[in-house]
Amino acid sequence: MQYRTLGKTGLRISEIGLGCASFWGKRVFDEAEAIRIVHAAVDRGVTFFDTGASYSGGNAEPRLGRALAGLKNRHELVVATKAGSYTDERGKWREDFSSSGVRRSVEASLVRLGLDAIPLLHLHGPDIHHLTDDLLDTLSRLKQEGKVRHLSANSFDEAVLEYVATLPLFEAVMIDYSVLRPEREPLIAKLAAQNTGITAGMVLGGGLYRSKLGIRRLQDAWYLARAWKNHRGDLRRGRALRFIDRQQGWTGGEIAIAWVLRNPHISCAVFGTTRMQHLLENLRASDRPLDAGMLARIAEAQRSFG
Ligand SMILES: NC(=O)c1ccc[n+]([C@@H]2O[C@H](COP(=O)([O-])OP(=O)(O)OC[C@H]3O[C@@H](n4cnc5c(N)ncnc54)[C@H](OP(=O)(O)O)[C@@H]3O)[C@@H](O)[C@H]2O)c1
């Protein structure tokens, strides 16, 4: 595993990270297997783990906490979690960017993760109007109190990410960037010019590049339904890229991750999985550059996105 520096934070993190969210965190997915996946990632040099208070109906973060509890080096890992969103008692996703809500969220995350400090806290999907002086003051105090080490924002909204990068309190952002989302590159270059650390989430584009989008297990149906609901255009983009899943000596997952890592401004490519085999395949993408021919074929397919 190779390691990169996360911009202004100065943190050294594994260039591939594990997303502890989505189906991985759901109660219907076997907890022992979810924990085995985390431990196998740690054993192979992964030091960056991304989760959130609201993910997987609220079960992802405490599940990651239980996985970390068995690890002697958990305080050396860079665990990123999110505040500003939560799952309510009826299982509904809610937003709360009030100062008291964000403080409550951070304090509860520390307990659920079993950590003394959150190494990287993302604000989860804020609008610019949420970033009040009052909230920034609370975030600054959480840092002074040692409860949060570094601050980031996770958003799909480019204007928000550009704005956050101008605020001295924020040292990093998390962006959705994958072979399905090449249009993020001008923004990535702009953020990197300010030395903002950048982690990329959903680096497999939800797995939509796969040559066959078959449903073998419950999670396959769940990911497809999510794409249909939230990222319908990605289904067409994925079909244009399915050739990456038919290459000799590479899996589609490796190519998708290697494509993200070819961008030197990305410090960590974060993917999600519920299959040990996929974890092992995807980690092979570290330090494995794509050749010019494959990069050209991918660029050609991306031109068809319009
Ligand atoms: N989704 C969001 O809106 C969002 C937003 C912000 C941040 N993030 C962060 O990004 C992380 C990853 O996002 P994500 O899990 O939603 O999407 P993703 O990593 O782009 O894709 C996950 C999908 O890819 C499949 N997959 C993984 N490895 C594979 C392989 N080698 N071959 C074939 N299929 C493979 C997974 O299926 P298997 O389970 O079968 O492997 C799953 O269906 C999250 O955990 C979170 O930390 C996500």
Image: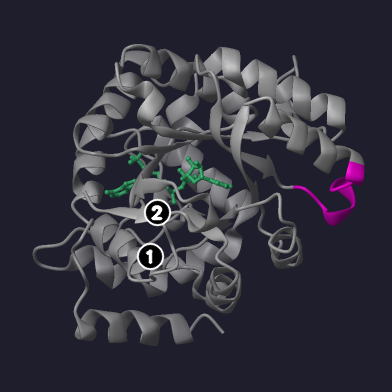
Residue 222 position within the rendered picture, expressed as x and y whole percent measured from the top left:
49, 38
Q: Nearer the viewer, residue 222 or 263?
A: 263
Quarter of image, res 225:
top right
Residue 176 position within the rendered picture, expressed as x and y whole percent measured from the top left:
54, 58
Label ID, residue 260: 1
As helix, strand or loop, the secondary structure at mark 1 comes to: helix
Residue depicted at x 68% and y 62%: 165
Q: Which residue is mark 2?
A: 269
Residue depicted at x 26% and y 40%: 279
**Tags 2 and 1 touching, CB below 8 Å:** yes
Residue depicted at x 23% and y 48%: 283
Quarter of image, res 128:
bottom right
- Disc 2 under 8 Å from ligand 1? The reply is no
- Disc 1 under 8 Å from ligand 1? The reply is no
Q: Tell me the quadrant of ligand 1.
A: top left
From what the image shows, is residue 197 above or below residue 106? below
Residue 305 relative to residue 220: left or right: right
Magenta includes 228? no
Q: Nearer the viewer, residue 96 or 75?
A: 75
Colour basis: one colour
- Label 2 CA crowd tier, 10 Å (few <14, some 14–19, many 20+): many
As helix, strand or loop, the secondary structure at mark 2 comes to: strand
Q: Amino acid at mark 1?
A: Val
Of the two numbered discs 2 and 1 on the same chain, state the one appearing first in sequence: 1
- Residue extending furthest front? 144
From what the image shows, is residue 86 above or below residue 172? above
Which residue range is magenta in the image?
A: 126-133
Label ID, residue 185: none
Residue 247 position within the rendered picture, expressed as x and y whole percent measured from the top left:
16, 68
- Label 1 CA crowd tier, 10 Å (few <14, some 14–19, many 20+): many
Q: Nearer the viewer, residue 117 or 244?
A: 117
